[in-house]
């Protein structure tokens, strides 16, 4: 069926036509959607979860749909236990993302911003933003041909979460004053981008030409160019100021080297002193405070964390801001030079069926290339101090964090989608709630931790930079790719906003305009009253989502084609 069947209402009571929310007036764009599994007989669900392409597209490591419908679907009590188990796994993945970001990712990003001499706003809009959104960018690039989700609806809901809720939490934790120019630039570009993308989809009625797709895509490069030019001008002023200070100094303070007694003491020791004791010390990750607690749950939680913390410590090099650290291990550092890149490459190869047969060859090549660097590192390092070349392992830290966060975030999103299917909720509702919280959880933790450590402006700028790069990578790039590869001479297939896509964009633009008005009336002093206003506004959006899902109110927008509860089986044949 190639046309939409519309129900026209009495114009004395309604000003516009829209689809009626029942089976006769809504049909799926993709008949073999994974949500269809709940309409099948129980003896067919297991096979469908294993073989259906849309269900397999949701699998990253574990096929949760197959696990539930092949193992737990035969008994109501067992089904409830499995749902609880899946929710517990969600909590564990949330914790793993939190621990990785706080322990490894935030120190690396902070150090990079300091090395590049960036101010808080530019660092938040570039380094922090790119770091936070790296998993999402990789996922968007790898999933350009994936049509199983409403990309527009999901992106707008995540943007609303970042621009309204996360930024408000930062204001609540650390009230601060913000520069008016940077504030207007950040928020203004977000309003411009969201409005232009929404207007483009609305004006073309979902059929984007390549011209529209290119114009949508070009906004981000313009924004990035403006930021880099601003940073260049700021660095130029800083260099001129530093040069004037050096010229004004009458005499230079001599730089003293390392004390002779310390150098002689280090020379008398073996460079491999306590090598294995230092290495095995990293396995002591038991949280003794929680383990010594009188609560059994705390003891179990302390024991459970040991293995994940060891795995993360082995895979991701730590960032040491000082020249010595008690947690440094020479042997582990040398192992990580080979292990971390090999793990990343093998994981990447495993995601492509055409390359899986070359996995052993790839491992051998990595070992041949990387082992000499590990031996060189072992030769030019000591156990009693962090070597000067250790700063180059920061690249391994960033790659390791990207890989771990990408893996856990994608797995968490797949798990949340499976939970949504099991609970019989619509695709757009899951996207605006569970998917949004799963995608934005790591960003919220990173930005919140930066705010607590005295960098609220950097965290605040990162919220809005994340929105721009998210729209660019998750909406504009896939749309441009679709127009280029479309057989219809540059016209993309119909772009669906979902039932809540337009609603999320309207809430986002309205909330940002309110933020601008609030900032101007308080002389750009972002206080807790503004934070409370943002949290309330986001809560209203969630209430609207729940009311729309249970058909108490009608969402702004008329696209109900992929609503799970309105799936018409007659179109699947």
Image (cartoon, rainbow, N blue to C red):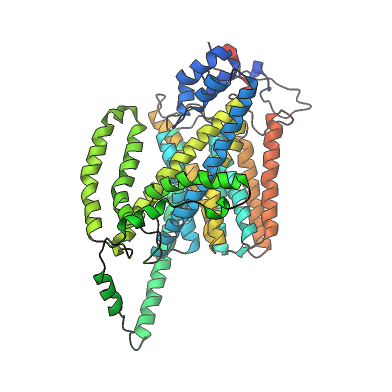
Q: Quadrant of the N terminus?
A: top right
Q: Is residue 569 visible?
A: yes
Please give left or right for residue 391 compared with residue 453 in the image: left
The number of numbered badges drawn on the structure is 0
Q: Is the residue 462 above or below the residue 436 in the image?
A: below
Please give left or right for residue 151 compared with residue 263 in the image: right
Q: Is residue 559 visible?
A: no
Residue 65 in the image, given as x and y percentages of width and height? 52, 25
Residue 467 in the image, given as x and y percentages of width and height? 53, 47
Of 278 and 497, which appears nearest the observer? 278
Of 262 and 32, which appears nearest the observer? 262
Residue 293 in the image, given as x and y percentages of width and height? 60, 52
In the displayed orientation, state which residue is furthest to the bottom.
Answer: 250
Residue 254 in the image, given as x and y percentages of width and height? 31, 83
Q: Looking at the rendering, which quadrant does residue 562 occupy?
A: top right
* Residue shown at the point (41%, 72%) measured from the top left: 238
Q: Is the residue 38 above or below the residue 315 in the image?
A: above
Residue 11 drawn in magenta:
yes
* Residue shown at the point (30%, 54%) measured from the top left: 331
The chief SS type of the magenta part is loop
Residue 266 drawn in magenta:
no
Range covered by the magenta-colored residues = 1-18
* Residue shown at the point (55%, 24%) measured from the top left: 68
Of 368 and 484, which appears nearest the observer? 368
Q: Looking at the rendering, which quadrant does residue 488 occupy?
A: top left
């Amino acid at each position: 069926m190639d046309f939409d069947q519309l129900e026209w209402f009495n114009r004395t009571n309604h000003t516009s036509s829209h689809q009626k929310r029942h089976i006769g007036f809504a049909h799926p764009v993709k008949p073999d959607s994974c949500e269809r599994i709940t309409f099948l007989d129980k003896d067919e669900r297991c096979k469908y979860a294993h073989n259906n392409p849309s269900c397999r597209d949701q699998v990253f490591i574990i096929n949760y749909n197959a696990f539930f419908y092949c193992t737990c679907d035969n008994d109501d009590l067992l089904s409830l236990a499995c749902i609880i188990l899946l929710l517990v796994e969600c909590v564990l993945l949330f914790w793993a993302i939190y621990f990785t970001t706080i322990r490894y990712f935030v120190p690396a990003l902070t150090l990079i911003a300091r090395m590049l001499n960036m101010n808080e706003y530019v660092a938040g809009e570039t380094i922090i933003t790119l770091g936070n959104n790296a998993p999402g960018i990789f996922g968007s690039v790898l999933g350009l041909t994936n049509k199983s989700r409403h990309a527009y609806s999901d992106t707008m809901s995540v943007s609303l979460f970042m621009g309204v809720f996360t930024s408000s939490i930062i204001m609540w934790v650390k009230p601060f004053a913000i520069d008016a120019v940077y504030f207007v630039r950040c928020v203004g570009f977000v309003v411009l981008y969201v409005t232009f993308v929404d207007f483009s989809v609305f004006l073309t009625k979902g059929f984007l030409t390549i011209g529209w797709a290119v114009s949508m895509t070009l906004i981000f490069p313009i924004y990035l160019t403006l930021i880099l030019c601003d940073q260049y001008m700021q660095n130029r002023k800083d260099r001129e100021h530093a040069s004037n200070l050096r010229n004004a100094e009458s005499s230079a303070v001599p730089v003293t080297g390392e004390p002779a007694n310390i150098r002689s003491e280090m020379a008398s020791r073996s460079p491999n002193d306590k090598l294995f004791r230092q290495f095995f010390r990293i396995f002591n990750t038991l949280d003794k405070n929680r383990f010594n607690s009188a609560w059994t749950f705390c003891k179990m939680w302390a024991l459970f964390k040991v293995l994940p913390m060891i795995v993360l410590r082995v895979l991701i090099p730590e960032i040491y801001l000082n020249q010595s650290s008690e947690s440094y291990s020479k042997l582990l550092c040398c192992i990580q030079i080979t292990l971390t890149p090999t793990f990343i490459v093998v994981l990447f190869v495993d995601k492509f069926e055409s390359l899986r047969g070359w996995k052993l060859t790839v491992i051998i090549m990595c070992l041949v290339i990387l082992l000499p660097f590990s031996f060189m590192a072992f030769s030019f390092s000591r156990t009693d101090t962090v070597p000067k070349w250790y700063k180059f392992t920061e690249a391994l830290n960033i790659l390791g964090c990207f890989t771990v966060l990408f893996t856990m975030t994608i797995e968490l999103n797949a798990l949340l989608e499976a939970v949504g299917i099991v609970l019989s909720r619509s695709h757009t509702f899951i996207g605006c709630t569970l998917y949004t919280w799963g995608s934005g959880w790591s960003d919220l933790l990173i930005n919140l931790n930066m705010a607590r450590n005295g960098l609220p402006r950097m965290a605040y700028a990162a919220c809005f930079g994340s929105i721009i790069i998210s729209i660019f990578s998750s909406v504009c790039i896939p749309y441009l790719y679709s127009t280029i590869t479309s057989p219809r001479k540059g016209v993309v297939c119909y772009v669906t906003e979902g039932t809540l896509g337009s609603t999320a964009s309207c809430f986002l633009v309205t909330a940002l305009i309110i933020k601008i008005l609030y900032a101007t009336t308080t002389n750009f002093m972002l206080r807790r009253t503004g934070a409370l206003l943002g949290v309330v506004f986001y809560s209203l959006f969630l209430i609207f989502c729940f009311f729309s899902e249970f058909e108490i109110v009608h969402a702004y927008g008329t696209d109900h084609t992929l609503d799970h509860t309105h799936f018409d089986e007659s179109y699947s044949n």
